[in-house]
Image (cartoon, rainbow, N blue to C red):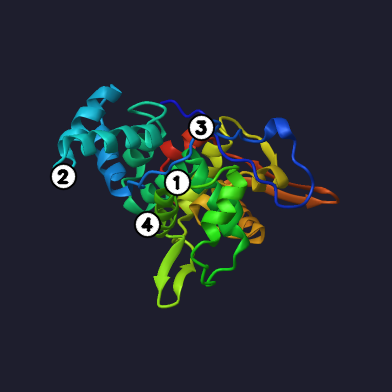
Amino acid sequence: MNLTQHELFRKHSGGAEPDPSALPRILHRPQRTLQEVLLKESLIAVRLALGVSEINEVRGKLAAALPQNSQATRLRYVDSVIRWFFRDGAQGFATTVWERFQSDEIQTAIHRYLYLASEPIIGTCVASALSRLSEGVVVPGDYLAGATAKLVGHELSTQTKKRLLSNLRKLGFLERSAAGDRVVSPALNKTALLIALHHAFNVDQQRSIEFATLAANPFWRFIGLRSEDSLRDFLKEAVHAGYLGKYVVADRLEQVTTCLTLSELLERRVQF
């Protein structure tokens, strides 16, 4: 299976400056619109992909399985699902996670991470705009779209603004209330977070990662953590459970050392 690192957004939130060469790259491609997130369809897709070697076969199976009446809609949905979750082929990362765990909870969290890592507009919103707000805060209707537009460097269309909020609700970052959209956190799945860490940093051997570099990659925000302190707590808990090698804080050094590769986590079906 191909477990190459997915490109993620750079974000630094304090502390020592991470080594720029070690940071994940931003996904650079022109994008001024945002499509509807397709989590239900993506879960269908990984089930259909089991045992399939060719991505075009996945395309055909998914197009036939989707319930939409319009063939054009089904094909558009298929293209999006393939682009978001099968960038590394039919038997890539997403399919392998499903094959090993067959857990909707783990898979949904992983797909949320992959989707946000692939969509600069909403990924930037979660990593750099939504993260500034406290959980439970009711967000003014135009705040997130306006803040995100400034971050991505262009205005958002009316439809993209609507989809930004709608997708954030579907992903579990916002919930409707009588007063408006309220900031919430998606249900945290620690197994998915552990897997995403190893995937984001392409851990194929034991390695040490400075905390500043780790925190600069928003994979943990995509999975559902909201603060660097909560990330530190997770790392310490993972070390105690034996899923990470060690977590060291000494003088100006703060880093975590892995003890398992991504492939080993998946092959052993490690559940945190």
How many angstroms separate mark 3 from mark 2 (CA)?
31 Å
Mark seen at residue 30: 3
In the rendering, which numbered label is found on residue 67?
2
Q: Residue drawn 42% across and 36% down?
A: 267
Dot in front, 3 or 1:
3
Q: Mark 3 to mark 4: distance in Å?
A: 24 Å
Secondary structure found at label 1: loop
| Mark 1 and mark 2: Cα distance apart in space | 34 Å
Tag 3: amino acid: Pro
* Residue visible at 37% across and 47% down in the picture: 107
Could you tell which of marks 1 and 2 lies nearer the N-terminus?
Answer: 2
Q: Is residue 28 left or right of residue 33?
A: right
Q: Amino acid at mark 2?
A: Pro
Q: Are marks 2 and 4 in contact (CB under 8 Å)?
A: no
Tell me whether circle 3 and circle 4 mark residues in contact (CB < 8 Å): no
Pointer 4 local density, CA inside 10 Å: few below 14, some 14–19, many at least 20: some
Specify few, some or many for label 1: CA neighbours under 10 Å numbering under 14, 14-19, or 20 or more. some
In the picture of the structure, the residue carrying the numbered disc 1 is 270
Label 3 to label 1: alpha-carbon separation: 38 Å
Pointer 4 residue: 170
Q: Nearer the viewer, mark 3 or mark 2?
A: 3
- Would residue 77 be seen by someone viewing this image from the given angle? yes
- Residue 88 image point, x, y percent: 41, 27
Where disc 3 sits, the SS reads loop
- Whether residues under marks 4 and 1 lie with C-beta atoms below 8 angstroms apart, the answer is no
Mark 3 or mark 2: whose residue is earlier in sequence: 3
The amino acid sitting under disc 4 is Lys
Give residue 45's position: percent from left, percent from top.
27, 38
What secondary structure is found at the residue carrying circle 2?
Answer: loop
Question: As rendered, which of 70 and 191 lies closer to the eye?
Answer: 70
- The answer to whether any part of residue 220 appears in the image is no
Q: Specify whether 21 is left or right of 71.
A: right
